[in-house]
Image (cartoon, rainbow, N blue to C red):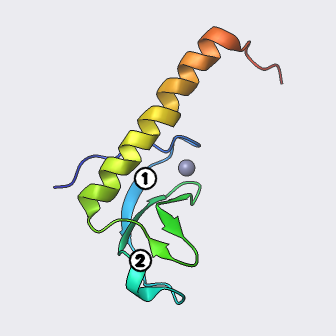
Amino acid sequence: MTEKLKPCPFCGGEAAVVEIEPRLYRPVMNKPFCVLCTSCDLYFGYDYDYGGEFDTKEEAAAAWNRRAGDEGASKKEKDFGANEAPQEI
Ligand SMILES: [Zn+2]
């Protein structure tokens, strides 16, 4: 089984590794996998013209988790706590 994906750093939704169709412009450069947030439709590791960026599901999942961990929830929580007052609505 593949690595479990962290939640989307933008919306907290569930992410999934998806296999995509080769893109038109550079089919030879296309790789079959990217990560899609099933909640906000964010594509990670995907380029509209050039296709996916990952050869394997594991590679896509690992890259997503690295990025989600680095730029996502953990950093956001820390920054919120240290620097930002809660927003008044
Ligand atoms: Zn999302």
In this picture, residue 33 sits left or right of residue 26:
left
Residue at x-position 57% and y-position 26%: 76
Q: Position of residue 21 (x, y in %)?
A: 43, 83
Mark 1 secondary-structure assignment:
strand
Residue 70 percent location from the top left of the image:
46, 33
31 lies above or below 86: below
Q: How many marks?
A: 2
Q: Label 2: which residue? A: 20
- The vertical placement of 51 against 62, above or below, is below
- The image quadrant of residue 69 is top left
Residue at figure coordinates x 28%, y 46% from the top left: 4
Judging by the rendered image, the residue that carries numbered circle 1 is 15
- Identify the image quadrant of the C terminus: top right
Q: Is residue 6 visible?
A: no
| Number of other residues with Cα within 10 Å of mark 2, as a class: few under 14, some 14 to 19, many 20 or more | some
Q: From mark 2 to mark 1, how far is it between C-alphas?
A: 15 Å
